[in-house]
Image: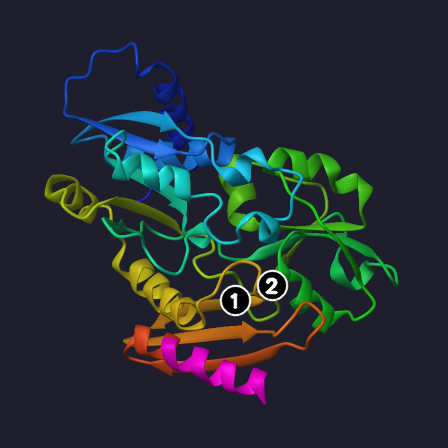
Amino acid sequence: MHLDRPVVIAWLKHFGTCLISKPTRPVLRVATRGSALARWQAAYIAGLLQHVVYVEPLVVATEGDRQVETPISAIGGKGVFVKEVQAAVLDGRADLAVHSAKDLPAVTPEGLVLAAVPRRGDPRDVLVGCRLVNLPEGALVATGSARRRVQLRELRCDLRFAELRGNIGTRLAKAVDFDAVVMAKAALDRLGERPPVVEVLSCETMIPQVGQGALAVECRVDNKRVRSLLAGIQDLITRREVDAERAFLTTLDGDCALPVGAYARIQGDTVVMRAVLSASLDGRCHFLVGEDNDGEALGHRLARQLLDRVVR
């Protein structure tokens, strides 16, 4: 099942009134961050579940939301956008949590389970403000992602980089201060943003972050009712891809301070994965492509092979 953007907008309006409407179905509380994108994603999941349950939002502020001027690596790396949301499920304030899959740490906290991964959005990155080939020599590109920096430097060694954080609206507003800004296409699509100059970077040109474009829904391990409901919104192809990518990340013990990316696609019965790893922001990128019927085994293998290359 998949919902178009207008349907999700309707569910966002529902989220604004659900606390004053009397539910006629069982109620589930969904924990989410408070950004426009996070609310969209929670509303999307609510729409997928609308025929069986009534969903109420629980907005949770995360450390990443509170420290918007600080680089993610300086405030804890991977997990800064999900820990407080996960805690709301663990302590019983919420029944489930909705995340961007790319924000999840490699290891799921004890007591939680990644119960559903719906159909994936666009996994690609985009350049906003200028096409790569048209950027002047020494152009200043804004991104808070180590993965994006090292791959862009492989393509254009003359580029300079600036840290940029904040929600989608903030980053778009600040785009005029730089020659280009790098963003996730799925985020722009979901919020209906259409910047005037956008270059979509293929997954061959810029390998995405693990889980990019996908949503991840967690609940408590012991909540059989919610796990059963969430099984109904699982997209088996996307889940297989994301599990393969997360196996890659787990082997690296990766966080978002490490320049690493992986993207898996199902071709027939085979999982094909592209992966990238760099030892540092200034180091060169190591790329690998592999395939296997067992996606998780493939992720583990590519991670070990890349680690071997980096330490040589």
Return the residue nearer the eye: 308 or 180.
308
Main structural element of the magenta stretch: helix, strand or loop?
A: helix
Quarter holding the N terminus? Answer: top left
Residue 265: say if magenta: no
Q: Quadrant of residue 299?
A: bottom left
Q: Is residue 6 above or below residue 140?
A: above
Q: Amino acid at mark 1?
A: Gly
Label 1 environment density (alpha carbons within 10 Å; few <14, some 14–19, many ≥20) = many
Amino acid carrying mark 2 in the image: Arg
Q: Earlier in the sequence, mark 1 or mark 2?
A: 2
| Residue at 26% in and 52% down | 110
Which is more toward the observer, 29 or 234?
29
**Horizontal arrangement in the rendering, residue 297 relative to residue 66 (left or right):** left
Q: Position of residue 282 (x, y in %)?
A: 72, 71
Q: Is residue 3 visible in this depiction of the protein?
A: no
Numbered circles on residues, count: 2
Question: Residue 166 at x, y = what percent?
Answer: 62, 38
Q: Which residue is mark 2?
A: 147
Q: Circles 1 and 2: CB distance less than 8 Å? A: yes
Q: Secondary structure at mark 2?
A: helix
Q: Position of residue 21 (x, y in %)?
A: 26, 11
Q: Residue at x 53, y 62 (%)?
A: 208
Residue stretch rendered in magenta on the structure: 300-312
Give the answer, above or below, for where 249 lies relative to 187.
below
Quadrant (top left/top right/bottom left/bottom right) for the C terminus = bottom right
Q: Is residue 140 above or below residue 67?
A: below
- Residue at horizontal 43%, vertical 31%? 39
Hey, which quadrant is residue 242 in on the image?
A: bottom left
Nearer to us in this view, 294 or 34 = 34
Give the numbered dot on residue 261.
1
